[in-house]
Image: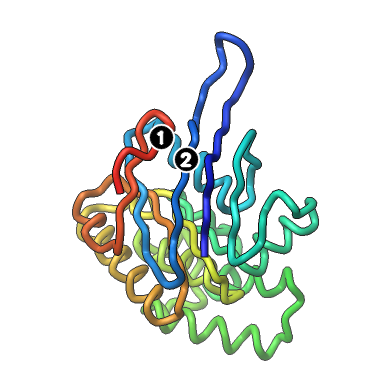
Amino acid sequence: MVKVADVRRSYGTGPAAVHALRGVSFEIGRGELVALKGRSGSGKTTLLNLVGGLDSPDQGTITVDGTDLAGLGENGLLALRRDRVGFIFQSFGLIPILTAAENVGVPMRLRKADPREREERVALLLAMVGLADHAEQRPGELSGGQQQRVAIARALANRPALLIADEPTGQLDAETGLAVMELLRAVVRGEGVTALVATHDAQLLGLADRVLELSDGEIIEH
């Protein structure tokens, strides 16, 4: 599903340049849940942004679902992020004025899905994440764990092949974080999704099929 080969990414030039990634290579099979660990500043977020098509490498190649990202123009990358990659962020990223159901439906509105299909998919996803009874509540009326569940449902709205999550439990207490990670694990199995999840929580790492460790921009452990 994902193939990363000798990827390098730096910010700035000259002596002040920051080398975020230094020749990173790995592969992720279909249906795998792979955890990415490493200290703050190790390059995790940079790597996730590159794999998700939010940024481009200085060197190396990234292939997602058989597509070389370097061959995509801006419109191609937009389509990739809309239709084939789902994103989950530490800060939830929900739209405050929209209900949980409306937030989940946003990606389907962007691709102009049929309204009936959209409503059915939203109801299914909210039930899947255990929030069927909270569809009409806005983010401010939900707990942190509930908001992250809405964010997971939204990420799955367009049936992505790849799910990318950047510290999805970072703002949650340990018990809630574990419940959210177990939900991600179940979603990967149930929906047949591949997932790359950055996390520093040792308990959560145990739920992954495989762990990649980044240190100073390099993979040091598989």
Residue displayed at 40% across by 55% down: 197
Q: Nearer the viewer, residue 54 or 144?
A: 54
Residue displayed at 34% across by 48% down: 212
Q: Is residue 148 left or right of residue 93?
A: left
Whole-percent x, y for residue 56 in the image: 65, 41
Residue displayed at 25% across by 63% down: 207
- Residue that carries the numbered disc 2 in the rendered image: 24
Whole-percent x, y for residue 123 in the image: 52, 85
Q: CA distance from mark 1 to mark 2?
A: 6 Å
Please state which amino acid type lies under the numbered disc 2. Answer: Val
Residue situated furthest top in the rendering: 15
> Disc 1 on helix, strand or loop?
strand
Q: Nearer the viewer, residue 16 or 24?
A: 24
Residue 167 in view of the camera: yes
> Disc 2 on helix, strand or loop?
strand
Q: Nearer the viewer, residue 59 or 204?
A: 59
193 above or below 147? below
Q: Is residue 192 left or right of residue 160?
A: left
Residue displayed at 39% across by 28% down: 216
Cβ atoms at labels 1 and 2 below 8 Å apart: yes
Q: Residues within 10 Å of mark 2 (few under 14, many from 20)?
A: some
Whole-percent x, y for residue 68 in the image: 67, 56
